[in-house]
Amino acid sequence: MRRLLALVLLPILLLSVSLSPAPAAVQAPAFRALLFTETADYVHDSIPAGITMVQQLATTGNFEVVQSASSSSFTDANLATFDVVIMLQNSGMVWDNDAQRQAMQRYVGNGGGIVAVHNTTDMNVEAQFPWWDQLIQGGAHMTAHSSIVQGTAKVADRVHPSTAGLPERWTRTEEWYNFDKNLRGDVHVLVTADETTYDAGGSKMGHDHPISWCRNAEGGRVWATAMGHQAASYTENAFRQHVLGGIRWAAGDAEGDCGGTVWNRFQKVTLDSAPDQPMQLDVTADGHVYYITRTGKLMAIHEGGAIVTAGTLDVYTGGEDGLIGMVLDPNFATNHWIYLNYSPADGPAAN
């Protein structure tokens, strides 16, 4: 009887073993990142917090990260193993020789991605490495920065992976960088600083103050933010997501348009090389351009570029008066009406 019971139990045991779930397969990293933290000048005390953040993002974002503070990492063979190089708070000439600098240049030319955080947008290497200076910030240089204050960043691009999900007005505490020229036109602006919400100092940039940007450059991808001064930034969820999206885009792991504000994507055509105090223009459905001058002229630019004076008014031009406004009638194609706002030479303002 005991033998029969054992024979009956054995198939049940085998069945229970065969139904145990197989171990889950380990997911391969989506991409590989080099986190470079060497400094040759000012050292931010937030660097360790930045390193921790990137390592945590690598774990949750499923990418591999290798951290280095040695410029010996910049060889063709080593860089070829990485999809993106994260430049964290670097300062001064961190590359030891031309071979390392040329390897970095070839890496970008071969499609590599670059992420630059805070001080990396102000490395002061324009004399020794002008290519890098132009690549990251289009030749713009940090002139001064605010104290560490709360201000508001305006998210200009709500679609890019580094800004999707951020609030349109993003309030945060930062050391806000000022630059000696507006980067717009050389880069795709992602975020601007609202100088009305903090004291930007004597070198403030005005209403259009780019603070995070990206660009397609020489076959590679560049993403940069001038934010990230404090260690607290690297535990701030919104900032972490901002940087993660930039890393993923630069590595080619996420799609995003970074060409919309680069001038070389547009063709610029001079319509009138010597206009006389132009004030306003309007364009017809068939491409003819009409514009006015403050001195009283209505000008027309026809197909082929011919410029003619369509009409002249006798206007008063003192102060800021004159011929100052125009609009084409909605039915201009059939009635040819143009509405003008001007100051007569000897009377009150007229329409």
Image (cartoon, helix red, strand yellow):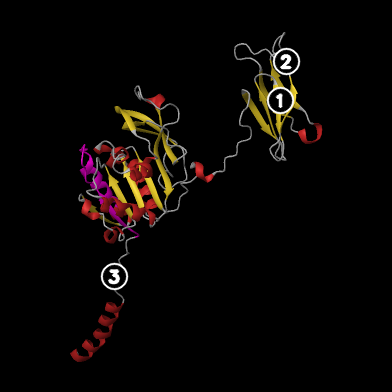
The answer to whether residue 48 is magenta is yes
Q: Quadrant of the N terminus?
A: bottom left
Across and down, in percent, residue 54 comes to 27, 49
Q: CA distance from mark 1 to mark 3?
A: 78 Å
In the picture provided, is 344 more to the left or to the right than 61? right
Q: Label 3, on which residue?
A: 23
Amino acid carrying mark 3 in the image: Pro
Dot 1: what SS?
strand
Across and down, in percent, residue 309 comes to 73, 27
> Which is more toward the observer, 65 or 349?
349
In the picture provided, is 140 more to the left or to the right than 316? left
Across and down, in percent, residue 296 comes to 69, 19
Residue in the image at 43% along x and 46% along y: 215
Q: Which mark is residue 298?
A: 1
Across and down, in percent, residue 76 comes to 29, 59
Residue in the image at 30% along x and 55% along y: 103
Residue in the image at 23% along x and 91% along y: 4
Looking at the image, which residue sits at the far top?
Answer: 346
Q: CA distance from mark 2 to mark 3?
A: 88 Å
Q: Quadrant of the C terminus?
A: top right
Which tag, 2 or 3, sits closer to the chain's start?
3
Q: Label 2, on which residue?
A: 314
Q: Which mark is residue 12?
A: none
Local packing at callout 3 (Cα closer than 10 Å; few below 14, some 14-19, many 20+) is: few
